[in-house]
Image (tube, rainbow, N blue to C red):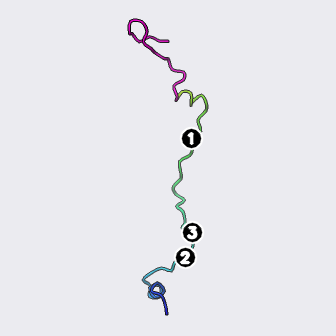
Amino acid sequence: MRTLQDQLIEKGLSRPHTDEVDIKNTRTRGKREERLTSREWAEIMGTNRPTYGRKKGGAFRQR
């Protein structure tokens, strides 16, 4: 007794199941991982920016 899947394959209505790995699309490339230096990280985090605060009188002044 044949299975339904075998009969469909025999009549050409279905493709046989294979355990092959799908071929990956080689045209698309993934994004490259961006490497940042410690100086660039410091700039992103804002460590070298001027800081301001409220002092006597309520005005913003540079610390």
Residue that label 1 marks: 34
Camera-nearest residue between 25 and 35: 35
Residue that label 3 marks: 21
Could you tell which of marks 3 and 1 lies nearer the N-terminus?
3
Rendered location of residue 36, percent (x, y)? 58, 35
- The Cα–Cα distance between marks 1 and 2, rounded to whole angstroms, is 39 Å
- Per the image, label 3 sits on a secondary structure element best described as loop
- Farthest left residue? 58
Residue that label 2 marks: 18
Badge 1 amino acid: Glu
Q: Residue at x 53, y 48 (%)?
A: 31
- The Cα–Cα distance between marks 3 and 2, rounded to whole angstroms, is 9 Å
- Farthest bottom residue? 1
Badge 2 amino acid: Thr
Tell me, yes or no, whether the highlighted magenta stretch contains residue 49: yes
Rendered location of residue 14, percent (x, y)? 45, 81
| Mark 2 surroundings within 10 Å by alpha-carbon count, few (fewer than 14), some (14 through 19), many (20 or more) | few
- Farthest top residue? 57
Depicted 29 relative to depicted 12: above or below:
above
Q: Please state if 44 lies on the left or on the right of 54 as rendered.
A: right
**Magenta stretch?**
44-63
Tell me, yes or no, whether the highlighted magenta stretch contains residue 34: no
Query: Would you say the magenta stretch is mainly helix, strand or loop?
Result: loop
- Per the image, label 2 sits on a secondary structure element best described as loop
**Labels 3 and 1 touching (C-beta < 8 A):** no
Q: Residue at x 49, y 90 (%)?
A: 2
- Per the image, label 1 sits on a secondary structure element best described as loop
- Report which quarter residue 38 is drawn in: top right
Depicted 32 relative to depicted 38: above or below:
below
Badge 3 amino acid: Val
Q: Residue at x 50, y 17 (%)?
A: 50
| Mark 3 surroundings within 10 Å by alpha-carbon count, few (fewer than 14), some (14 through 19), many (20 or more) | few
